[in-house]
Amino acid sequence: MYIPTKPSRSSTLAMRHLEYHVRHWGPQTAGDGLPTLVLLHGWMDVSASYQFAVDALQGDRRIIAPDWRGFGLSSGGPVDHYVFADYLADLDLLLDHYAPGEAVDLVGHSMGGNVAMMYAGVRPQRVRRLVNLEGFGMPATRPAQAPTRYAQWIDEIKQLHAGDKTLKSYDTADGVAQRLMKTNPRLSRGKAEWLAQHWARPNAEGRWEILGDPAHKITSAQLFRLDEALAIYERITAPVLAVEADSDSLGQWWKGRYDLNEYHQRLGHVPDCRQAVVTDAGHMLHHDQPQQVARLIEDFLALP
């Protein structure tokens, strides 16, 4: 099994009627002129997902990484769906507590990258630099899709309450590791075995359950509004590094509904944005190539 070289420690913050779990690496306070580095994980993932990249970082700095509400060791509350805007408010309150008055360095992967981009436009004074790891956003929508989307949302809520939307459980932690390796063929067994211990927990019957609320599977009732997203991108004042894997996971997901060319056009609305590609990597690029990702992050954050 993988053995971390920089083990994390945990804290829990009571916030917005939830218990938020936050993982910490490095010193307790920011030092050496470097702000706090904040790592935001993606959908159906956990903060421990960054361990391999943290181990690959050359410097020693203060790092925090929350488990988003309803993921990992953070509670989700008595809800049957999740709203994207809540992640923005959660992040703002987390920074008020752990990095008050600081402009932080923000790194987000996938959904966490989307949160980071939106937050940096909503609260530009709170972000010094931003690294977006495959946070592509969603395909553009049209107002005419709204009636069907609301109906889909209602139907999925009913399915959840009927017990039709669940997350698969596994006999053993090895079963979880096998699932992780099936989803990401580049993931080594040692890393998968370590991640499985943080991605799932045994329940009262001894079966390993994914640490994610099934309510996260409910489609958003609100359409993704590209015009709103671009207006927020235009308000970002922090330099942005947009990192993608060379395998084009975006094209694999959306099958022509949304592609890298459109994503790159959207990045043109960010006032100061540069791009980088991680080779021999899939969507979980911080698992596949942690050394490449760590080097890109540190080099970018060190720029004057």
Image: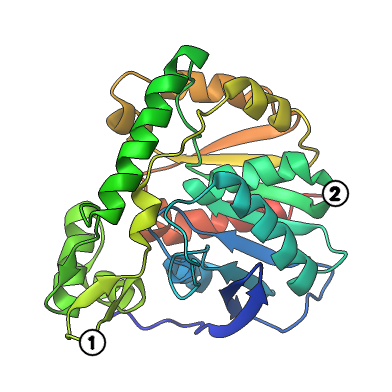
- Disc 2: which residue: 125
Relative side of 6 to 99, left or right: left
Q: Earlier in the sequence, mark 2 or mark 1?
A: 2
Nearer to us of marks 2 and 1 is 1
Q: Which residue is depicted at the point 37% across and 29% down?
A: 151
Badge 1 amino acid: Ala
Mark 2 secondary-structure assignment: helix
Return the mark for residue 204.
1
Residue 21 seen in render: yes
Badge 2 amino acid: Gln
Give neighbour class at mark 1: few <14, some 14-19, many 20+ (Cα, 10 Å): few
Give neighbour class at mark 2: few <14, some 14-19, many 20+ (Cα, 10 Å): some
Q: Which residue is depicted at the point 47% across and 42% down?
A: 134
Q: Nearer the viewer, residue 204 or 257?
A: 204
Contact flag, marks 2 and 1 (Cβ < 8 Å): no
Q: Quadrant of the N terminus?
A: bottom left
